[in-house]
Amino acid sequence: MRRAPVATDSSGVALITFFDFNHRIQDMTGIVAVPEPKTDPEAELRSAPPDTTLERLLMGDEAAACGALDAGISAAYAYPGTPATEAFEVVLRHSARAGRPVAAWSVNEKTAYEQALGVSMVGRRSLVVMKHVGLNVAADPFINSALVAINGGLVAVVADDPGMHSSQNEQDSRFYADFARILCLEPRDHQEAYEMSRAAFDLSERFQIPVLLRLVTRLAHSRSAVVTLPGEPERPIAKTTDPKSWTLLPANARGLWRRLVEVNRELREWSEGCSFNRLEWSDDDRGLGVITTGIAAGYYQQNLPELGFQPSHLHIGAYPLPQAKLRQLAARVGCILVLEEGYPYLEERLRGILPTPVEVRGTLSGHLPETGELTPEAVGIALGLASRPGIALAGEPPPHRPPQLCQGCPHRDTYAALVEALRDYPQSIVNADIGCYTLGALPPYSAIESCVCMGAGVGMAKGASDAGLRPAVAVIGDSTFLHSGITPLIDAVKAGTDMTLIILDNAAVGMTGAQDTVLPSTRLEPLVLGLGVDPEHCRVLDAHPRRVPEMTEALKQELAHPGLSVVIAVRECIEHARLEKARARRGR
Ligand code: SF4
């Protein structure tokens, strides 16, 4: 079922146009103010009688989560990360109301994935949710889990972020699924996000492999009508009877690898016939074939009325690729245009699958931009349509508003103290990490000099100190520290590195919506001391505007200390405090 969407992001602002949305609306502003639904659509949906078919306005994230809930998952795990966070929040809310499934934020994506794997081993269905770069963290269990004989369905919902709205890169998770040699599903719209999420659990159990459901920002954060079907009950516990198929000793793993190769043959066969991969012939294709993947189908359909003819069209929503269908299309047309969101994954592979006389157009041929998101406009131009002039906004253009730390954010006070404490040094290095505090790179503080990946700042400061540049400072949030900062700190403890680690403890994962940190603030100091940090140089400070002079003095002392020091700057994120108050008012 298809509906013209009300496409909004989680803040109630429309993000995108696809399906039947009017080009000109998008061209004019890129955004359309649409109020967020007053009710929680997922709550209404879940409180309906169990045999009810419902239609609700859901974000792509929410649709994928509802599909998993309706597939009868017993447990779900995640680490917050835009644009995937909202999918897990649906599961959390449902779990809080209904008591099932088991659902909790994990310390990082790797531990989340491993917990989901444990659920699968005992025969129950499990969901794991993460953003694309989170899959880098979970890569070890993710890739190895392709070899074990998945028991209860295991589905990883991974949201990619083309255009880097909230991420450090544009990596395309289809490559990960391919690398692991598992099945990947890529919904074209919200309805398919729901349907594929449900189907993914059946497919995971049928082929005994994990399934990756790939979302992208424009789908994850926009809303559309979704029809949901009655849900399934949880599976009973049925632990695997073949522990060898879960024990990757080389002698077992060789056999399991052969099994995976055989499963891949079955997957390729399945992909040819599956309803997510559809080939539609046109009597008037004029020698042009169009292949779309995921949400590119909507952009393509938007442009069709203006095109004046109908290319033959293959839509791909399931991988591995349906090679026979690709060859059938190539045998009939002289030119193929590939429309895909992300890397030129399909375009690159086509060149090895198709006969050379067929011209392949896409990003590699220069017909589509190689970076950023796909847009209806870019698709129209690739189809040969003229560029559409935008409609000028009346009045002055809106002022440029660069992102900044909230007024009253505790990080402001820590950065003010750090900048002051470093003033006496002719050179220094401050390596930071991923979180709200990365905004410390911008004026007025300009306090940090790097942000690479979760936890990297700690290891990088150690490396800089090893190289001889001091003072070397690492700045990391409490949640990022628990996620990936502990292990490089152990390296620094063992080496007795001359560096200062500042842990910004705001009791929240601020950047993704102020979720609770896995461990409360009171547990950080004992944790750091337990790793072997000298108690004389492990200080807990109050990150408050009135305490900036004291913080500055303490930081000066620790920067001067010729060894490892850890400073924990504590004050609650004001957004987290606001949400806590609202929760208390609602009585939960
Ligand atoms: S959300 Fe919290 S941590 Fe992030 S900038 Fe605002 S106050 Fe600071």
Image: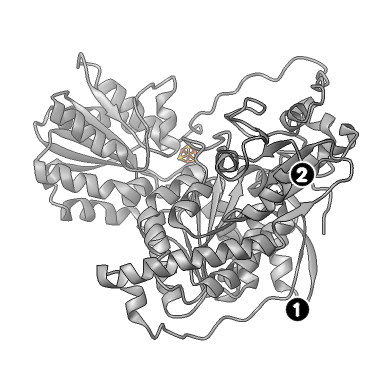
Residue 102 marker: none
Q: Is residue 588 shown to the viewer in this render?
A: no
Q: Could you say where residue 41 lies in the image, as x and y percent from the top left?
A: 73, 60
Q: Is mark 2 within 8 Å of ligand 1?
A: no
- Tell which circle, 2 or 1, labels the residue nearer the N-terminal end: 1
Residue drawn at 25 percent across, 27 percent down? 552
Q: x, y percentage for residue 172?
A: 52, 43
Residue tagged 2: 332
Would you identify the image quadrant in which residue 394 lies?
top right
Q: Residue at x 58, y 69 (%)?
A: 203
Q: Position of residue 420 (x, y in %)?
A: 28, 21
Pick the residue in front: 321 or 370: 321
Q: How is the image coloured?
A: one colour
Res 49 label:
1
Crowd class of label 1 (few under 14; some 14 to 19; many from 20; radius 10 Å)? few
Q: Type of residue at label 2?
A: Arg
Give the vertical position of 240 relative to 358 (above or below).
below
Compared to 124, does 272 lie above or below?
Answer: above
Q: Residue at x 50, y 28 (%)?
A: 404
Q: Quadrant of residue 311?
A: top right
Please name the amino acid that badge 1 sits on: Pro
In the rendered view, tell whether residue 257 sits above or below residue 26: below
341 and 189: which is toward the camera = 341
Q: Secondary structure at mark 1?
A: loop
Residue 54, how many percent across, how many down? Answer: 79, 68
Look at the numbered disc 1 and say if its residue's Cβ is closer than 8 Å to ligand 1.
no
Estimate the spatial distance between the alpha carbons at disc 2 and disc 1, rounded to whole Å: 50 Å
- Label 2 vs label 1, nearer the camera: 2
- 39 horizontally vs 122: left or right: right
Residue 435 seen in the figure: yes
- Regarding mark 2 in the picture, which secondary structure is present there? helix
In the drawing, does residue 341 fall left or right of residue 5?
Answer: left
